[in-house]
Amino acid sequence: MLYNLINALCIAAGAIIGLFLKKGIPDRIRETLIKAMGLCVFYIGITLAIKGENTLLIIISIAIGTVIGEFFDFDAKVNRLGAYLQSRFSKGEKSRFAEGFVTASILFCAGAMGIVGALDAGLTGNGDTLVAKGIIDGIISAVFAATMGIGVAFSSVSVFIYQGLFVLLATIISQYLGDPVIASVSSIGGIAILGIAINLVLDKNIRVANIAPAVFIPMILSVFGII
């Protein structure tokens, strides 16, 4: 769990650095920067999305996951949580707290690197993958926090809980998650990240948090021996 904590702390530290950078960055540059980061997120999404080979599984998982997400409306719940935390901690400052929290949480949690790293740390005690992910996440969180504010820092909590669950359950689920399942999870996460990129670059309102449950569908199907 130590390595998972390091990953989370890297995100929080990067976000704090980003907040200091925000004060010295003109609005025009911040606006262009967020579009540029959107393009980078687009690249990350494509890189992950092309890893999967089972196209039918990916499509079915996204369909099922999106229906579940819309039924429970996770997007609205996460945004309400973000709004509450904003009122609690930002002292009335008009910030992009909820957007930063949601965007960073999904970006840092959706990829397969966190899953693989958590499994490795839980089974063997080797946390190299999670530490490397933490450094990458920290750099990204600094850039995001410079444009979206303190909400990015709170995504460290989402990452700690999400990856922590995989660390704790590693010995139970690892035997069911082969490379094809991890690849499918990665692809679905990449597609969700593409939704984030579109929101950032084109100012659209794709409810990505309601698509995110699709990431878990291949794992569930694998546990029950369906795939």
Image: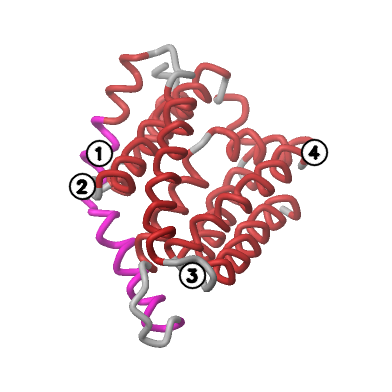
Q: Give the structural element (helix, strand or loop) at label 4.
A: loop
- Mark 2–mark 1 distance (CA, rounded to whole Å): 6 Å
* Residue at the disc numbered 3: 150
The three-letter code of the residue at mark 1 reads: Thr
The three-letter code of the residue at mark 2 reads: Glu
Q: Is 138 displayed left or right of 131 in the figure?
A: left
* One can see residue 197 in this view: yes
User: Where's the C terminus, which quadrant?
Assistant: top left
Q: Nearer the viewer, residue 81 or 223?
A: 81
Q: Give the structural element (helix, strand or loop) at label 3.
A: loop
Mark sitting earlier along the chain (1/4): 1
For the residues bearing labels 1 and 3, Cβ distance under 8 angstroms: no
Mark sitting earlier along the chain (2/3): 2
Q: Where are the magenta residues, as a range?
A: 63-89
The three-letter code of the residue at mark 4 reads: Asn
Q: Residue at x 72, y 56 (%)?
A: 6
Q: Within 10 angstroms of label 4, few (less than 14), some, or many (20 or more) residues?
A: some
For the residues bearing labels 3 and 4, Cβ distance under 8 angstroms: no
Does residue 80 belong to the magenta stretch?
Answer: yes
* Residue at the disc numbered 4: 126
The three-letter code of the residue at mark 3 reads: Ile
| Numbered badge on residue 70 | 2
Q: Residue at x 47, y 40 (%)?
A: 110
Mark sitting earlier along the chain (3/4): 4
Image-quadrant location for residue 177: top right
For the residues bearing labels 2 and 1, Cβ distance under 8 angstroms: yes
